[in-house]
Image: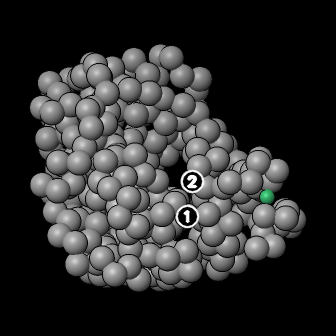
Amino acid sequence: MSENLHIVIDKQWIISNRGNKNPVDPLKPYGWLVEKERTVSGVIEDVGIIFLTNRECPFHCLMCDLWKNTTDQSVPIGAIPDQIEWALEQMPPTKHLKLYNSGSFFDEGAISEQDYPRIASLLSSFETVIVESHPKLINEKCLRFKNLLIPELEVALGLETVNPEVLKKLNKQMTLEDFRNSVGFLNENGIRSRAFILLKPPFMSETEGVFWAKRSLDFAFNIGVDCCTIIPVRAGNGAMDQLLDTGDFSLPDIHSLELVLEYGIRLHAGRVFADTWDLGLFSSCKKCISQKINRLNTMNLNQMIIDRIKCTCEKK
Ligand code: SF4
Ligand SMILES: [Zn+2]
């Protein structure tokens, strides 16, 4: 564990290290895409993702860079359904849709409850709708949204890490008990949950990063999470770059991501996915990187372990 765990990391410090936001249009989502995912029924299907533009998340977690594509003020009532309508007109039809809003869907300052009926009506043809939320914003409001929806609702929650000391340093403002309670509440109300788990947050060595990601998978499945996504931690938000400079953070290696994904799949406790966005960051070996990315993508889709890529870079 890093010697510098005593650094005071708070909202002010995190914000003071930020750069500028990207220009966004409050009336347009800042992106959309379609990706393949193994669904709960075990088939591989297209899932649409809309990246909604709205007010930035009030939590300011240490590793988060989602503020880059947000507004400072709440967007007007009607803007979020307009964004969804616009995106769905551009996108090919899919059965499943993720609405990611760089924060919490249930944050009233981001998405007003007044918009729920129109949002629900726009989503009526989907089988599954996945939204993301901070665990502390899971309450009756989720049920009011669920009750308006025809598709099944799933909520993605950031667990980040079950190392309590590091979790505190992330400024997530959440305890493991908060997370457990939120998953319990969702389960009691027939709402599936997925957990985002960080691979090697700051203040961890490579070995500790793998260890705590595995323990986080254990915890998430034990308390009733339906599926987990492992996210290798990146720099780029200012605060994380500072921690790179002080040696309190270094990028995880793609091999660690492979180890954790293999572990998670072997648990047979639920689907486990590796986040494969920009994986070139996590390897210095040009010889095997594309094969390793293919391997992770294939394991994500099939949920089966396939042979490791043999390369000289792992003989160190
Ligand atoms: S709760 Fe999520 S969106 Fe909000 S700051 Fe933390 S990681 Fe970012
Ligand atoms: Zn290699």
The type of residue carrying mark 2 is Asp
Q: Is residue 266 left or right of residue 175?
A: right
The type of residue carrying mark 1 is Pro
Q: Nearer the viewer, residue 261 or 108?
A: 261
Can you give x and y, in whole percent of width and height, for residue 183 in the image? 35, 70
The reply to whether callout 2 and callout 1 are in contact (CB within 8 Å) is no
Q: Disc 2 to disc 1, how far (Cα)?
A: 13 Å
Q: Secondary structure at mark 2?
A: loop
Residue linked to disc 1: 252
Can you give x and y, in whole percent of width and height, for residue 274 in the image? 60, 58
> At x 36% / y 25%, what residue is drawn?
29
> At x 65% / y 61%, what residue is drawn?
254
In which quadrant of the rendered view does residue 69 lie? top left
Can you give x and y, in whole percent of width and height, for residue 304 in the image? 77, 66
Q: Is residue 38 left or right of residue 176?
A: right
Q: Is residue 300 left or right of residue 155?
A: right
